[in-house]
Amino acid sequence: MIEPRIYDLSSPGRMAVRLPESDVELSKLPDHLVREDLPLPELSELDVVRHFVRLSQLNHSIDTGFYPLGSCTMKYNPKVNEDAARLPGFAFSHPFQDQELSQGNLILMYQLQEWLKEIGGFAGVSLQPAAGAHGELAGLLIIQAYHRDRGDHKRRKILVPDSAHGTNPASTTMAGMEVIELPSDPRGNIDLEKLRQICDETVAGVMLTNPNTLGLFEEHVLEVSKQVHGCGGLMYGDGANMNALLGVVRPGDLGFDVLHYNLHKTFSTPHGGGGPGSGPVGVSEQLIDFLPGPVVDIVDPGDEDLPPLYGLVGPEKSIGRVKAFHGHFGIFVRAYTYMRMLGKAGLRDVADHAVLNANYLRVKLRDTYHIPFDRTCMHEFVAEGRWADAPDIHALDISKRLMDYGFHPPTNYFPLIVHEALMIEPTETESKETLDAFVNAMLSIAEEARSRPELLKNAPHKTPFGRLDEVKAAKELVLCCQPVEVPES
Amino acid sequence: MEFPDDLKYTKNDEWIRVEGDSGTAGISDYAQDQLSDIVYVEVTAAIGDEVEKGEAFALVESVKAAVDVYMPVTGKITEVNEALIDTPELVNSDPYGQAWMVKFEVSDPSQLDDLMDVEAYKQSIEKRSN
């Protein structure tokens, strides 16, 4: 073990903080609240700091290396976001503070709602959902509430393309609705003929990820929208890939009725273990009343002497609260800062450079790696990690070997419609030099796959741990933070 | 890869073996190869259930993906392979034998005509692999 578990570093009686002798009488906790069976580790402050810093050094992060994990938009998280989030006025505010004392926070939330409305072409936004899939669930509940409110109880089906995000069918099931899979056509678009066949009065809506997980812009989106609306359904947009569209296309203009944003992807707030997500939902005019609440609005327009007063209001037919308090407020501050720093033109540049970088990699790799849907991509593309003359090599082996070159692997085996899928998303924050280094690594690995396949099969070689036994990890879950007896193997 | 010629196959890579009125189903060698190491199998249908053709009766999970397994034809479940709960890897090692998933009474034998024979199935795999 490179780094022992924190329990193994424990020494009885050691502690990080010594409080002065109490000069008042101690009051004991009630007996039923006292536990004896909770052996927390006992360490000095220095032990704790070293333990966690060492662990962090074993990890790969966006601050240490390139992270082309497809569909996750692992872009750089600017440090100015962290500065803003640590301003005492934000950091030390409390959700139970009076409205009058929270005006700064409420204005920030209001402004963020307004910008997200503008960026997506929506009439209303709720910041509540805690992450992308949570936004999906909220959006689906909004769609359900809309149909029920019209007295239409037949609509239980959600159409989900086979190139959608994996969370879409899961969210649909979670919302108690039925998933109907829509196949892709040879260009990676929705098969319109199939859509025509299944779109009827039992369809509540379609969940479309655009650009989809092939990194392709859905060329039929207007036709899909027309058909789905034509049969009385609504259009749900998975905004996880909004990075490619910022300032270029507004989903609301394409006919989407609901869309969730991922502040932790598109708007550069930390994720992948670095911080909580945030998945605000935007909706069209007809759905505003159903938004999860509360949302921020101007509750008193003010006058010559008094500024407007901002407050929390509950939409009229709201699906209710989906998150404690006001959502992940600290993340709102970071996303707000990001938008302020870039401005309107800068946000547009994000999309342009994200698309440029992805296409640069695609073209550099296309002669070596087969790209099944090889047309101009958006922010990401999907290559096949297999070659006829290297029959034992799989996408997984390529990914593991990439770690030896210091890169985080791309997303593996998704979407399922591509064999041995490697889904690559460079994001806009990488330089040409970094992209070239990645291309060189990918080309070297393709060569090694033929000349020294064992280098790939046994990779990674340079990481703190070698190839992990994923089958064993999946079958023998050890979900326990206390020392456990590990049998000798 | 092996594809026994006494079986019928679906486009979703299930196989069915018919003996008299009784059918047995599982997933093909190609399916297990694509999924790689299987770590979990759950037969979601219970004995006595009437499961429609195309309806999911099991869930198979590998280190790569989780997929539903669909009934090749409508049938009433008579037996479920409990061994797969503890030894899902049988799907990798013996997909047509020990890794059968359900046995059932075939409700409508005419549905068998819609399924692929071994040659048609091999061709469909060929087409998909390229």
Image: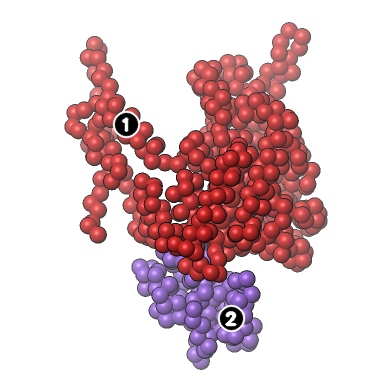
Chain colours: A red, B purple
As rendered, which of A177 and A426 lies closer to the eye? A426
Circle 1 Cα neighbour tier, 10 Å, few/some/many (<14 / 14–19 / ≥20): few
The answer to which quarter of the image holds residue B81 is bottom left
Q: Residue at x 36, y 49 (%)?
A: A465
Q: Could you give the CA–CA distance between mark 1 and mark 2, rounded to whole angstroms?
A: 58 Å
* Chain on which label 2 sits: B
Whether residue A320 is visible, yes or no, is no
Q: Amino acid at mark 2?
A: Lys
Q: Residue at x 50, y 40 (%)?
A: A65
As rendered, which of A278 and A472 lies closer to the eye? A472
Residue of label 2: B122
Q: Amino acid at mark 1?
A: Arg
* Chain on which label 1 sits: A
Residue of label 1: A50
Circle 2 Cα neighbour tier, 10 Å, few/some/many (<14 / 14–19 / ≥20): some
Whether residue A444 is visible, yes or no, is yes
Q: Is residue A447 left or right of residue A185?
A: left
Q: Residue at x 68, y 44 (%)?
A: A355
Q: Residue furthest bottom?
A: B20
Looking at the picture, do discs 1 and 2 lie on one chain?
A: no
